[in-house]
Amino acid sequence: MFGRCRLLEAGLESIGRLKEFAMKYYPDETLADEQIARNGRATQMFEITIEHMSGKQVQEK
């Protein structure tokens, strides 16, 4: 796999992506918001963009 990775800058972009990610794992939006408010500044998020992917095709039975 080939691609690019970049650090999301602190601000609205990273907070929005962090909330989107947190909603996959927290059952309640208010709980996710509390955790982001408490620990959001200590979090770094990276965006990975896939440019090329190679692999082998599998023959399933």
Image (tube, helix red, strand yellow):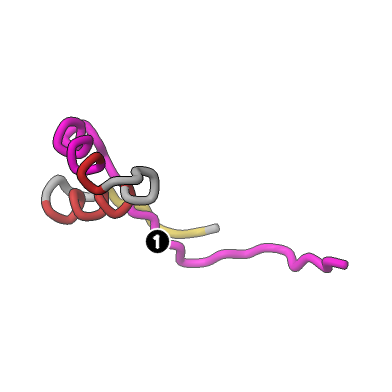
Q: x, y (%) of residue 52?
A: 52, 66
Q: Residue at x 22, y 35 (%)?
A: 35
Amino acid identity at mark 1 = Thr
Q: Residue at x 39, y 61 (%)?
A: 49
**Quarter placement of the N terminus:** bottom right
Q: Crowdedness of circle 1 by 10 Å Cα count: few (<14), some, many (20+)?
A: few
Q: x, y (%) of residue 48?
A: 39, 55
In this view, which residue lies farthest toward the left?
11
Q: Is residue 10 visible?
A: yes
State yes or no: residue 12 in magenta.
Answer: no
Q: Is residue 16 above or below residue 38?
A: below
| Quadrant of the image occupied by residue 36 | top left
| Quadrant of the image occupied by residue 42 | top left
Q: x, y (%) of residue 24?
A: 38, 50
In the foreground, 42 or 24: 24
Q: Residue at x 19, y 43 (%)?
A: 33
Region rendered in magenta: 32-61
> Would residue 4 appear left or right of 59 to someone viewing this image?
left
Q: Is residue 56 above or below residue 41?
A: below
